[in-house]
Image (tube, rainbow, N blue to C red):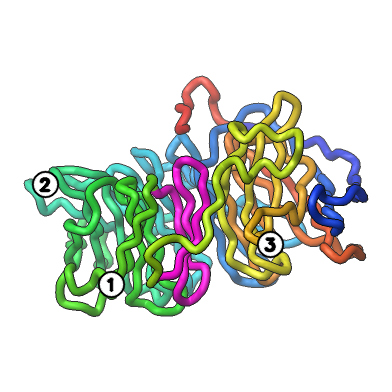
């Protein structure tokens, strides 16, 4: 990694005392502590561990590499993993170990790395059962007990697959074939863009696709037809989804629309269009975008992270849902990039954001907060620096 130029700026906290247009509660702004860089790659996605007090974060870059950091009162780089030969479609730490990282790439390969052995690849998963051709992946996820691995493919060979592997059967030597347990290929008609296992029910899986469907499967059933418990039609292209409660889901579409669904619902019980992200009078709806919905109370209530771009600045907000509309809950001051993904460390209340300038922001609660809506400050800003002339724009 190239040299990182550090520039420590003055820590400044601002409070916005102006009332919301439709609400008298105050909107807190944030403070900034900055490390600036020379060059950057895009950061496509971020994941982390829920260990405490120190936790780890992994960031997937547009040059196919992964950066691993340790975060406590400061941030330390642990490793750089640069063996991938194709764009990364997802990364996730093991739910049982902060030293094991899963990386899925679009070339159809899911690798398991051991950070105790300098990122050594200890297992590989792929499906090359059709004439040796590996199915290209678009998404993946792990079950809550780390027994099952699921991968969603691009639309290929006239089908879109959800593949399953038993992690315990990975074998100890790289090169040993880890054949999938099986797969589903009748429930989606286009790229499977997102997969999400239930956080506590290991055999329940939700999937989303560019065909507009969100499907929920019970993996204990003997066939795909029986396993498909619910099929929800978003009437759009599904970008991201996740579990909101034990029996409800949130969904973000490629048109920057948020939908909230009950699993048994015939339609979304709440829908928020892109125009509703314009919570400030200076916002242009066409320049507003969604990042991720966080179904956690670490910030006091679940919130939608959203941004808006102007010629002068990159705005970033935490939006809450109240009276069937989106309201600004926190405004983050100091963001310098279009944010593409975020992750929450629930025990410490740290929010990690990554984006198009290759910067990792770690936001955490200020100890001196006295307002009803607690103030949040930027713990630190990290950056990755690579050859800008050789990067590719992923968006």
- Foreground of the two, 257 or 23: 23
The percent position of residue 273, horizontal first and vertical second, equals 55, 46
- Residue 298, image quadrant: bottom right
- First to last magenta residue range: 238-263
Provide the residue designation for mark 1. 229
| Residue located beneath label 2 in the image | 132
Mark with earlier residue (1, 2):
2
Which residue is drawn at the image coordinates 66% and 53% (left, top)? 326
Q: Residue 261 in magenta? A: yes
- Quick one: which residue is furthest to the top in this view? 389
Q: Residue at x 42, y 74 (%)?
A: 144
Sequence order check: which comes first, mark 2 or mark 3? 2
Query: Is 260 a magenta residue?
Result: yes
Q: Which residue lies under the disc numbered 3?
A: 322
Determine whether, in the image, residue 315 is placed left or right of residue 87. right
Q: Nearer the viewer, mark 1 or mark 3?
A: 3
Q: Which secondary structure is most common in the magenta stretch?
A: strand
């Amino acid at each position: 990694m190239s040299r990182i130029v550090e520039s420590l700026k003055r820590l400044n906290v601002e409070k916005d005392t102006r009332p919301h247009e439709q609400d008298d509660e105050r909107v807190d702004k944030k403070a900034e502590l900055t490390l600036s860089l020379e060059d950057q790659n895009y950061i496509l996605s971020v994941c982390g561990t829920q260990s405490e007090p120190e936790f780890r974060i992994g960031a997937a870059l547009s040059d196919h590499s992964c950066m691993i950091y340790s975060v406590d009162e400061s941030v330390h780089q642990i490793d750089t993993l640069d063996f991938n030969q194709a764009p990364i479609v997802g990364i996730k730490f093991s739910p049982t170990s902060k030293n094991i990282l899963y990386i899925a790439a679009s070339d159809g390969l899911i690798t398991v790395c051991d950070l105790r052995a300098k990122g050594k690849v200890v297992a590989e998963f792929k499906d090359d059962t059709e004439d040796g051709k590996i199915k290209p992946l678009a998404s993946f996820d792990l079950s809550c007990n780390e027994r099952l691995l699921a991968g969603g493919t691009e639309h290929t060979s006239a089908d879109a697959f959800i593949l399953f592997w038993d992690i315990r059967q990975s074998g100890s030597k790289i090169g040993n074939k880890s054949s999938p347990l099986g797969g589903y290929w009748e429930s989606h008609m286009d790229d499977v863009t997102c997969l999400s296992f239930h956080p506590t029910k290991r055999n329940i899986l939700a999937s989303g696709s560019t065909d507009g469907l969100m499907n929920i499967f019970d993996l204990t059933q003997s066939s795909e037809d029986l396993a498909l418990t619910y099929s929800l039609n978003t009437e759009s292209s599904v970008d991201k989804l996740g579990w909101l409660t034990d029996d409800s889901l949130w969904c973000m579409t490629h048109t920057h629309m948020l939908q909230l669904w009950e699993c048994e619902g015939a339609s979304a019980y709440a829908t928020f269009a892109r125009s509703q992200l314009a919570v400030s009078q200076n916002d242009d709806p066409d320049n507003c975008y969604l990042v991720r919905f966080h179904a956690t109370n670490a910030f006091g209530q679940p919130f939608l992270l959203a941004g808006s771009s102007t010629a002068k600045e990159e705005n970033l907000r935490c939006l809450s849902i109240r009276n069937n509309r989106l309201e600004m809950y926190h405004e983050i001051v100091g963001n310098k990039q279009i944010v593409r993904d975020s992750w929450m460390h629930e025990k410490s209340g740290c929010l990690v954001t990554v984006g198009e300038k290759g910067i990792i922001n770690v936001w955490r609660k200020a100890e001196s907060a006295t307002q009803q809506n607690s103030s949040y400050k930027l713990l630190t800003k990290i950056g990755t620096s690579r050859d800008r002339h050789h990067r590719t724009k992923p968006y």
